[in-house]
Image: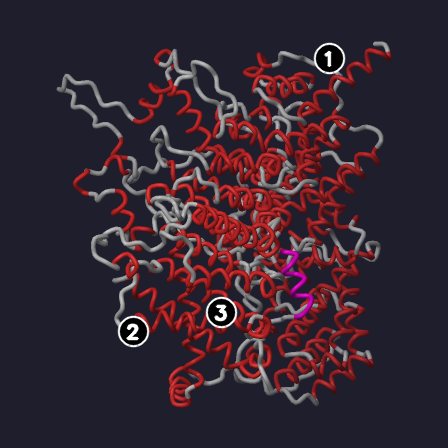
Amino acid sequence: MTSNDGKEEQTKIWETINRLRNTIEELPELLSLLTAPLETFKLLPPQYSHYNTEPLPAGSVKVPKHIPPLQRALLEHIIPTWEAPLKEKRLYGLVEQYFCPDAFAFTSSVAGELAIHAYSTILSLPLVEYSTYFLVRLSKAYPIDVAWTVIFGGSSGASGRWELTWEDLVRDISAIPAKVANALGPKSAIPLELEQGTYFNHVSRRCEILVKNLSAKRTRGDIFSVTYLLTKLVNLGIFPATVPSSTSQPSFFKTNLDSIRYHLNDPSYGSFWNEIFVSVASTITLRAIITSLFVHLNPVEGTENAVATRILVKKEGLLLRSLLGKLSTDRDDLWDAVNAVILGRDWDEGYARIFICWIAGSESRLTEVDALELFLSNIVDLWTNPDHIRHSLLKKHQYVTALLLLSISYLNAPSGSSAALVSLAFSPQFIKSISTYLTHLDPSVRRCGMLVAEEVARASGKMLDFGDWDGDNDGRAWCRSIRILVEERDTDIEFTEDSDDEAEDVQNEVMEPPLSDSEVEGVPAPNQEGYDSDDSLTGYVSSPSSSRSPSPTPSELEEIEKDPTLRVTQKKIPRPVYLAQLGEMIRPTTVKKGEEEELKAQTQEVGLDTAEELIRRKRSYGTELEENAVNLAYGLAGLQNDYDLDDFVQKRQNALNALVVCCPRKAAPAIIEEFFKNQYSTEQRYVILNALALGARELASLSIPETPALQTPLRLSFASKRLPQTLHNRYLTTADQQSTAPVQHLLEGISQDAIDKSRDSTTDKVPQYAREKQLRVSKPAKVTEVKNEGSLARLQSTSMTVRPTTVFTDVAAESFICPLINRFWLFLRDEQTREARTANQPVLHQYKGAGTGLILNALVLSHFMATLAVLVHAGRNAKEWLAIIAPDALELAVTVGTRPLSSAEGEDEDMDESIPGSQASAKGKEAAVLTTSLELALVVLDGCLYLDGGRTISLEHTSLVLGVNQWAEGVLSTLEKGMKILGGGGVQEIKLRRAAAGVILKAEEVTSKWRRSMIDTLPNSSM
């Protein structure tokens, strides 16, 4: 191959990667790009081979050089866009083949290399749902032992390179649970396979399998790789110092100890563990592993003298002998670690029996005298320590005493006493410690010293008897049981079949070889049949005597529906994968000649079905959403149900809500501008306002009302069951409007909370009510936990919380509230100018700005004010709230509630025009407009009190606050006098009274606190 050919091949593969990073319009083009690199590795499944229309030269793709950028392009560009279409066509396996090759390619070394690179590539990017799915598959198909084989299996040279690859892989695998938990946060469910306990227990299981596989033929490099892995697991807490009480706490030995026992039948397996323990470089790490091993041994009754208990002690001693080997001074690191663990922690007498049995050799024929004598000297140093004698608890005294007596019993052979025991009996340090024990205030501790003195004297050939051993109190019973225990050695017990059964009964578990992962996965799950909510859709089974054919099942109906021979002339609309395609579906810019209406309906339906999901999926990927947000806003706001699509209103609303949430700086100003244009219907204006309110609540992390049940379509309602549309809209109740106006429902809760706070604060000011409330509500002081509010706690909570990209307080004034208010003033000016120009024209030619379907109509205007109130409430923590948002919103509320906005505002359609003066008397504010205006004022005043006690609004806008109070008092006085308000009565009148009373309470609370300063700021005030 010439150099030019090599450059051309490299150019082709990089061209493929760049095309994957850019926009791909057609699915066949994508499939061609995906299949070509896989074919060069022989990893392309046969069912996809016909898609490889642009093959690459063999050997042109290099795994270390080209696979990471290929995987990154798929994660960042292809999967977010094409995941749904590929899954729908059952072609997603091509993408999975780049990260977790299937069983077809499992034996290939290249497949393993792709999986190794997949770990690092996935973890280097922000984790999302599909990348988490790949991690689940990788942890099952390519665990740590399989990855070891991929890295070291075929390597003969360049060991340093492979060791670095192994270290990177171990770090990646160890970081998966923490990164997944941080990425998904508390609101998303973590896959069971990636939860802390389950995941690391599986890693521990595969680590033991790796040790078993390497024990047959091992090298120094194998030992290094395993010790590095175990050190990493120790740092992650997988070797706990206590037995875990929960399945969420991983433990290496709790998972693997049964398997280790079974595999110890192979001598090479145990010797490999010996080398692993000796090769651990860090003493702290070695101590952690040994401690975890000890605590997971089978518990033994401390002073029980039964044969089954002694057999269990010997078995555990043999286990330690096989794993840790025999102790000697040649293995200094292991000796120091074992001494520190055995003598530095609080164990019981059962563990003392196991430790001495192991150190003595665990065999009756041969006792490790040198190791026992060396260990005995360490025990004596601790037992004779004055600080230990004075300050240790009784449990620790009994444990160390048991260690000492058991060691003496193993050294006191029938042939003669050991020289170490004779020297111990005459040691000045030992004799002095006996006198210290005898002067101890605790009689149980005192008897520990007496017991040891008698046993040491007897072992050295002397006689000593303190007497006073009868009875069960003050440690006498324990001393007698220990004397009986040390008369025989646990290593002298012989194994028989019957004794093994007794030991298994004591142990309460049967040592069986654990099932491998393949055996576990191969067991079929039991077929559980129960009630199915879709049982009613399944056809009845015909009786054998019936001549009728059985009813088709839902799956059969679906197959019939997809039968291509029955749908020859029908064209299937593909799902959009880019926002530009979605915009073309919803708001087509080109009209094709001869396009059928059915095709247009299908296009619009597919666009609505995928709109919300696609918009939310594109939220965190590049600038595509910002570039298409305005076009989508125009299309969704002006969309009409011309084809009677199912769930049209809900899908359009959800899509527009998602657009406002995911791109608030572009979408919100765009739909606000559209709201004030004349070509939209009342329903479309409702959709716009609902999107603003619900999107703001979601951005502010506030609760959102649940989606109401779909209402029966109007075309299915009988004509006799409905009023004409005008009267129907007029007499809608609040409960009826909740399905189409969730904003009203939100505002009702907000205003009620504000009124409740005013009621509570007013009650506290009346002495008799405050005392009664104190007696009724107050509870005695109790000890409560003080939460840590320090900087460290705040830092931890901040680092663990997944914050949205944009919060509502950042965009409340700029993109939502101020554009809405300012645009309303401009619209109102233009409408009043048009009315003034035609005021002198005949009635038929006069312009009315408050007609049906227009913004100044009471139905739309009340919803507008309610939406503004919800936005003001959601943005009260914005930095511009007190200085800009609050006074502007309050001024708008007063103006709408007190000033006539149109010459046709408030005209009663049922008033008889022949009655003189009836038209003049009938004009006035609609009750719905008054209510929402007062509720907006209530929300503003409540927010001012919440933020600064009303200081800014009362001192800088005094006239406005006093005007609000006067306005609310006038409305309430009118209602108290029994005067009727247009559109009032029933529930509406109750809401109006409540809103007026709430504003009065809030205004009084503000003015009572700042009255002196407010008088000084009033215009023309005199001192």
Q: Secondary structure at mark 1?
A: loop
Q: Earlier in the sequence, mark 3 or mark 2?
A: 3
Residue 96: x %, y % from top left: 59, 28
- Mark 3 or 2: in front is 2
Residue identifier under label 1: 57
In magenta stretch: residue 72? no
- Mark 3 Cα shell of 10 Å, populated few (<14), some (14-19), many (≥20): many
Residue 146 to residue 936: above or below: above
Magenta part of the chain: 790-800
Residue identifier under label 3: 942
- Mark 1 Cα shell of 10 Å, populated few (<14), some (14-19), many (≥20): some
Residue identifier under label 2: 976
Residue 432 is drawn in which quadrant?
bottom right
- Mark 3 or 1: in front is 3
Q: Secondary structure at mark 3?
A: helix
Magenta span: predominant SS is helix
Which residue is more in the foreground, 134 or 488?
134
Q: Earlier in the sequence, mark 3 or mark 1?
A: 1
Calculate the distance from the C-alpha at mark 3 to the C-alpha at mark 1. 72 Å
Residue under the image location 35 percent in, 28 percent down:
643
Residue 528: x %, y % from top left: 34, 38
Residue 751 to residue 901: above or below: below
Q: Is the Cβ of the residue at disc 3 closer than 8 Å to that at disc 2?
A: no
Q: Secondary structure at mark 2?
A: helix
Q: Is residue 837 left or right of residue 211?
A: left
